[in-house]
């Protein structure tokens, strides 16, 4: 198996190989149009129709592939056309690797040739060097299409506060004005968290041949969807303790071979991903938010595991550009994920499908359980809210954390009544605000008596588990 980390270890501000070893050979486009899956759920059609009337009425509005809407009226005509070209018919692009080098974020993406985009931190007013660059060698002024598309994806992944249904203002530099400074945006979010959302591996020269955990997880999601199996139950012999291998072909085991191909080839992974339906686990936005929460909490726990002297919130992180993964940082992500779930519930023309509502409820219960289980100091801090995640989100102030959202999808939330009962029992000794406990009790009472809750098919969560996946050979 090739080692993309080795390729990325050569990444620097001064030099970058224009192509990878695999791209030295002529290759065909990774996503032939005839292989695109035309099976769409109702949510797909909703996404396509959202805001289309705005674009028809206003020629200065353009929608990106991530469904964000941009206003171009403050751009010169040439820049408007560049943005339209970038979004109207985007060529297939595979985001491969990303890395933080000193004060610059670098993203490696492959079209038919590898490009590297650099997002550099500003070093002050006297610094006249460009902060956003691409190795495509464009000959015109303004941002290239690669830069515009990458910044659009970064904004989509890091946007917790702005309403995605409203148009954003495109700047001449190729990103939304609402995004702020791109480098600071990534630094605040943290590169490893962003990379998961971009399906892009973080290049770590010190990782040797270790497998990327997120790529392994998503490869399992992709393969399990072929059999309509739950990812957690699919082929434990492959995924429980996967190990690196230089050989891609696994004799007499097609599943294992495809798994290795997904790890080895970014184009193949992106091609497989492009065929997935919105109902598949890897395209489930609520599942992805749960995974983001898990990653955030792992980073917080890693900081907590350090010695008190090095785990201080004021201590420098592994990278001087990114702040440590503190309680405040983790809380921003968790509150942001809850906001995105709430937006998905309300910001649509139709109610959630039962399947979607259950996925949303599962993610909310997962977030709530994770917070309640972390009533401990993660690191030193002036106040309880500075050092204790539970106290920051629930204990110190009643903010209706998660409860308000669960109350909107009671039918789906009733499927997790046992888990909510367990969480409520844990809240008792923690001294949660009395008003929060009353709201929690009221929610549980309504879930017990909800006639809508019994109308949902309870086997929905487990019916696919009863059909064990067949093994391809």
Image (spheres, rainbow, N blue to C red):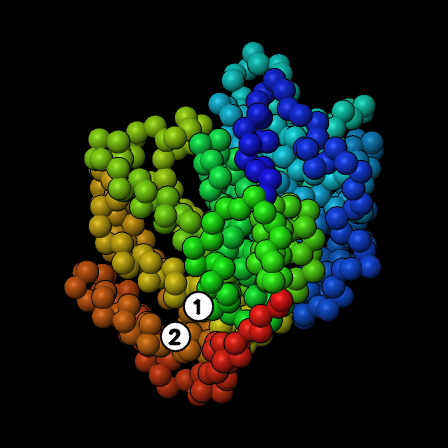
Q: In which quadrant of the rendered image does the N terminus lie?
A: top right
Of the numbered discs in the image, which one, if any, rests on residue 117?
Answer: none
- Cα separation, mark 1 vs mark 2, equals 7 Å
Compare residues 265 and 443 and report the one nearer the observer. Answer: 265
Identified at 60% across, 40% down, the residue is 2
Q: Where does label 1 land, which residue?
A: 362
Q: Is residue 101 left or right of residue 72?
A: left
Dots 1, 2 in contact, CB < 8 A: yes
Q: Position of residue 394 (x, y in %)?
A: 29, 57
Identify which residue is drawn at 33% across, 72% down: 419
Tell me the residue that label 2 is attached to.
416
Foreground residue among 405 and 312? 312
Q: Secondary structure at mark 1?
A: helix
Find residue 73 and report its horizontal and vertical position in percent. Answer: 75, 38
Can residue 415 be seen here? yes
Residue occupying the point 44% across, 28% down: 321
Q: Is residue 416 above or below residue 209?
A: below
Viewed as shown, does residue 209 lie left or right of 76? left
For the view shown, which residue lies furthest in the top direction?
A: 126
The residue at the point 50 percent across, 50 percent down is: 214
Q: Is residue 90 above or below residue 427?
A: above
| Helix, strand or loop under label 2 | helix
The 10 Å Cα crowd at callout 1, few under 14, some 14 to 19, many 20 or more, is many
Drawn side of residue 113 relative to residue 395, left or right: right
Q: Residues within 10 Å of mark 2 (few under 14, many from 20)?
A: some
Residue 165 rendering spot, x and y as whole percentages = 63, 55
300 or 157: nearer the eye? 300
Residue 371 position by quadrant: bottom left
Residue 291 image offset from top left, x and y in percent: 46, 55
For the question of whether residue 120 can be seen, the reply is no
């Amino acid at each position: 198996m090739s080692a993309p980390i080795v390729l990325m270890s050569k990444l620097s501000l001064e030099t970058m190989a224009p192509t990878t070893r695999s791209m030295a050979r002529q290759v065909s486009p990774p996503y032939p149009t005839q292989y695109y899956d035309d099976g769409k759920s109702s949510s797909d059609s909703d996404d396509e129709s959202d805001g289309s009337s705005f674009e028809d009425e206003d020629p200065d509005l353009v929608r990106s592939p991530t469904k964000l809407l941009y206003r171009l009226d403050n751009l010169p005509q040439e820049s408007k056309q560049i943005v339209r070209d970038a979004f109207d018919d985007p060529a297939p692009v595979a985001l491969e690797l990303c890395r933080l080098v000193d004060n610059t974020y670098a993203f490696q993406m492959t079209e038919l040739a590898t490009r590297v985009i650099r997002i550099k931190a500003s070093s002050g007013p006297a610094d006249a060097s460009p902060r956003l660059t691409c190795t495509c060698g464009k000959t015109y002024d303004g941002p290239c299409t690669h830069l515009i598309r990458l910044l659009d994806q970064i904004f989509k992944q890091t946007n917790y506060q702005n309403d995605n249904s409203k148009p954003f203002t495109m700047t001449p530099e190729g990103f939304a004005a609402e995004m702020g400074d791109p480098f600071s945006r990534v630094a605040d979010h943290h590169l490893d968290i962003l990379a998961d959302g971009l399906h892009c591996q973080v290049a770590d020269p010190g990782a040797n041949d270790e497998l990327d955990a997120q790529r392994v997880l998503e490869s399992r999601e992709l393969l399990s969807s072929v059999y309509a199996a739950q990812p957690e139950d699919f082929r434990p012999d492959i995924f429980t303790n996967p190990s690196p291998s230089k050989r891609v072909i696994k004799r007499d085991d097609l599943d294992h071979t495809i798994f290795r191909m997904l790890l080895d080839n970014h184009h193949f992974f992106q091609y497989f991903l492009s065929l997935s339906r919105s109902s598949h686990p890897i395209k489930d936005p609520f599942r992805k938010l749960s995974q983001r929460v898990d990653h955030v909490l792992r980073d917080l726990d890693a900081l907590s595991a350090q010695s008190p002297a090095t785990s201080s919130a004021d201590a420098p992180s592994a990278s001087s550009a990114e702040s440590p993964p503190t309680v405040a940082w983790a809380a921003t992500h968790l509150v942001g994920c809850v906001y995105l779930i709430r937006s998905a519930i309300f910001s649509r023309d139709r109610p959630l499908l039962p399947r979607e509502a259950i996925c949303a409820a599962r993610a909310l219960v997962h977030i709530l359980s994770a917070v309640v289980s972390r009533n401990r100091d993660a690191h030193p801090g002036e106040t309880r809210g500075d050092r204790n995640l539970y106290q920051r989100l629930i204990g110190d102030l009643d903010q209706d954390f998660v409860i308000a959202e669960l109350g909107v999808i009671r039918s789906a939330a009733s499927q997790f009544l046992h888990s909510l009962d367990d969480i409520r029992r844990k809240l008792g000794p923690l001294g949660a605000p009395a008003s929060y406990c009353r709201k929690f009790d009221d929610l549980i009472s309504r879930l017990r008596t909800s006639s809508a809750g019994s109308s949902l098919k309870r086997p929905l969560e487990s019916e696919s588990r009863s059909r064990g996946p067949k093994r391809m050979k």
